[in-house]
Amino acid sequence: MAHESFREFLNTLEAAGELCRIKRPVASELEITEIADREMKKPGGGQALLFEQPTINSDPSPIPLAINIYGSEKRMAMTLGRETVEAAAAELNKLVKAKPPTSLGDAFNLLGTALDLRHAKPKRVNGGPCKEVIHRFENHPPAPNVGQISTLLNFPIQQCWPQDAGRFITLPCVVTHDPDTGERNLGMYRMQVFDEQTTALHWQLQKVAARHGRRYYEKGERMPVSVFIGGDPVYAFCASAPLPDGLDELLLAGWLRQKSVPLIKCETNDIEVPADADIVLEGYVDPTEPLREEGPFGDHTGYYTLPEKYPAFHLTAITHRRDAVYPSTIVGQPPMEDFYLGTASVRLFLPILKMNFPELVDIALPAEGAFHNLVFVSIKKTYPMQAYKIMHGLWGAGQMMFAKYIVVVDDDVDVHNTSEVLFRLGACTDPQRDTLFTRGPADVLDHATTDLAIGTKLGLDATHKLPGEAGFHREWPPLIKMDEAVQKKVDEILGGDQN
């Protein structure tokens, strides 16, 4: 289901009892964070929040701020236009099963082809709501009146946490192109606001946009970049999804919407953005200027990311809807809104992983692991050392390379129940025999690694052990479980007592 505007989606949430409007003025500096954090920590993720009068340095912003839009299983399903996230995953599974792939890369290539064949390819349009208001920076100095949306300082961009270096745009959809192939990438990289028309672009070294940027730096050419905010909420989900390099995120967005994404050319560069976006920031990165210090920033790790050098993004134009809404999010100690975004990505792409790992039953990224720090995997084990095969396979699969701990359990374990996984971890492992240390790429946001972006991995085999596996020569005992006939009879007895 396509949402024609972000406001339309908010109205849908409100009708479903999923939105709370906050009418009183609330500061975009810290106060919105505190309210949103309390809401996100509620069981099930709480409600989405719409701040109708966010303030900027005590002055009212003409644009409302929405947050915790994705922060529940129900709202994620509504974002994907399905009854459940699993329903979307099942549809995707049917779509790509026509031709079994021979590798994970083949599986994602097949996905791209299948999406294209389903008429999900974006279409070009000549006009759209994102151009209702246009402000070019050339020959137009920033207007001082806060009521005019003519600079970044007019938007209710949050300072999320006390030690943040400033205000950060946290749900930007950043569009870049490969200068050699022209392939588009849609990514999500936080943007620290430096002044009214300059931000940082925090694209980490393993990200696709960073690869695009390196080529522009090598060529010594100015890099066009455009950023859009809002529009159909599925755009931000696709920007954050762990798609492989070369697969257009807007194909996935079109398929999920069941309608092609309408694209319109920017005013000051040749990049195309969704015509239904709320806000568009056009600009460039100059490879001849030095990198700028970005951060600290209160990150999804639950700790502040310390300052590092990143490119500066210079705005050449701002365009937006007249009735624009500014979508935002915060990250920090879990559980937070991003837990639901990450979980939805895992659920959606699990069928593709299963095509290459047929023994795989389920995967969970518990909130306590802050995404890829901790991964629980269940498999249907049929041969010795199979758990280790899965560990190595996942560490080689896209952003799973960042997983610090992988715990593999048997197929009768619910990996979404952390208590069950920890029980098997304690009961079914010998610490020396059932652990695997290896080295690999690490998330640059991980402050615990000895070196930036380089770390160790730990795999734990908590499956039942087969005879002779890893030197195990004992009989494996059965798990204590009541007879099903007795369970059924007791259900009848207790049911009768209740009546």
Image: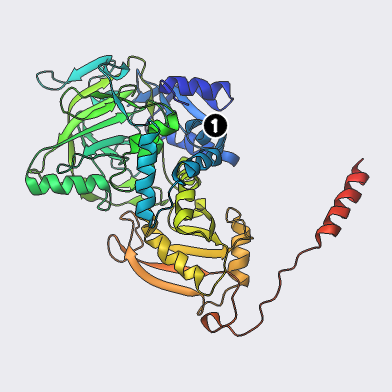
- Residue 203 makes an appearance in the image: no
Which residue occupies 39% across, 44% down? 111
Where residue 26 appears, x then y in whole percent? 43, 26
Quadrant hosting residue 317: top left
* Farthest residue, direction front: 99
Q: Residues within 10 Å of mark 1 (few under 14, many from 20)?
A: many
Where residue 217 appears, x then y in whole percent? 11, 47
Q: Nearer the viewer, residue 410 or 147?
A: 410
Q: Nearer the viewer, residue 295 or 392?
A: 392
Q: Nearer the viewer, residue 40 or 345?
A: 345
The quarter of the picture where the C terminus appears is top right
Q: Nearer the viewer, residue 254 or 460?
A: 254
- Residue 226 makes an appearance in the image: yes
Q: Can you say whether 116 is above or below 398 in the image?
A: above
Where residue 267 appears, x then y in whole percent? 18, 22
Q: Can you say whether 18 is above or below 131 in the image?
A: below
Secondary element type, mark 1? loop
Tag 1 residue:
47
- Residue 222 lies left or right of residue 490; in this view the side is left
Quadrant hosting residue 178: top left
The figure's colour scheme reads: rainbow
- Residue 211 lies left or right of residue 241; in this view the side is left
Which residue occupies 45% across, 47% down? 349
Which residue occupies 45% across, 50% down? 352
Where residue 357 appears, x then y in whole percent? 47, 59
- Residue 255 lies left or right of residue 499; in this view the side is left
Query: Number of callouts in the render?
Result: 1
Q: Can you say whether 47 is above or below 454 in the image?
A: above
Which residue occupies 48% across, 26% down? 1
Name the kind of residue labelled 1 in the image.
Gln
